[in-house]
Amino acid sequence: MDKEKHDARLRFAFASFLSANGLRFTPERSHILKVVLTFSRTFGSVELWEACKADDSMRVSRATVFNSLPLLERAGILRRIAFDRTVSYEVIRQKLQLRARQHLVCSECGKVRRLQAPLLAEWVGCQPYRDFFPAPESAVLTVNGLCGKCRRKKSKKSK
């Protein structure tokens, strides 16, 4: 029941944001929001479009999905995570707890591996952020390098 209340609050917040900006809360945007809220991890725009396409309850065009992402971001429902080659999104579920993640990004193929970083959260939590009120909400550490597959491919080419 708690998740349903949270999802209803996000739906109301998105509808309020759209009406405040002179936009309509269409059934397609409502469907996109419903699909977005099913993700428990980060996702890409193509992955969201494929999930909307797989759900047969409503047909949503690719352009509508791609144009709705910045609106969801500006409404405070999604957080955009940009890397060198890829852009991912995540649903902002809780603002009360500091979320710290570590992203390992392959500089060759663009593959991203996401890990929790409890030591990063501990370090950020003890820093004096006087300009932030009340405290930071998230921290992301990005480590760039080669994944095992690309490293093996490069070593085969050099031999």
Image (tube, rainbow, N blue to C red):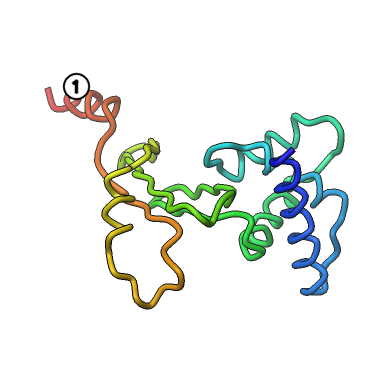
Q: Quadrant of residue 68?
A: bottom right
- Location of residue 24 in the rendering, given as x and y in whole percent from the top left corner: 86, 64
Q: Is residue 44 left or right of residue 38?
A: left
Q: Is residue 76 depicted above or below 45 in this figure? A: below
Residue at 35 percent across and 43 percent down: it is 103
Quarter of the figure that contains the N terminus: top right
Mark 1 is on which residue type?
Lys
- Location of residue 33 in the rendering, given as x and y in whole percent from the top left corner: 74, 48
Q: Is residue 53 left or right of residue 70?
A: right
Q: Residue furthest left?
A: 159
Nearer-the-camera pick, 146 or 78: 78
| Disc 1, SS | helix
For mark 1, what is the residue?
Answer: 156
Q: Is residue 5 depicted above or below 14 in this figure? A: above
The number of callouts visible is 1
Q: Is residue 118 depicted above or below 29 in this figure? A: above
- Location of residue 94 in the rendering, given as x and y in whole percent from the top left corner: 56, 51
Residue at 57 percent across and 52 percent down: it is 92
Q: Residue furthest bottom?
A: 131
Nearer-the-camera pick, 84 or 39: 39
- Location of residue 10 in the rendering, given as x and y in whole percent from the top left corner: 72, 54
Sort mark 1 into few (<14), some (14-19) or many (20+) by Cα contacts within 10 Å.
Answer: few
Q: Is residue 121 depicted above or below 24 in this figure? A: above
Residue at 34 percent across and 44 percent down: it is 102
Nearer-the-camera pick, 98 or 75: 98
Residue at 82 percent across and 74 percent down: it is 22
Quarter of the figure that contains the C terminus: top left
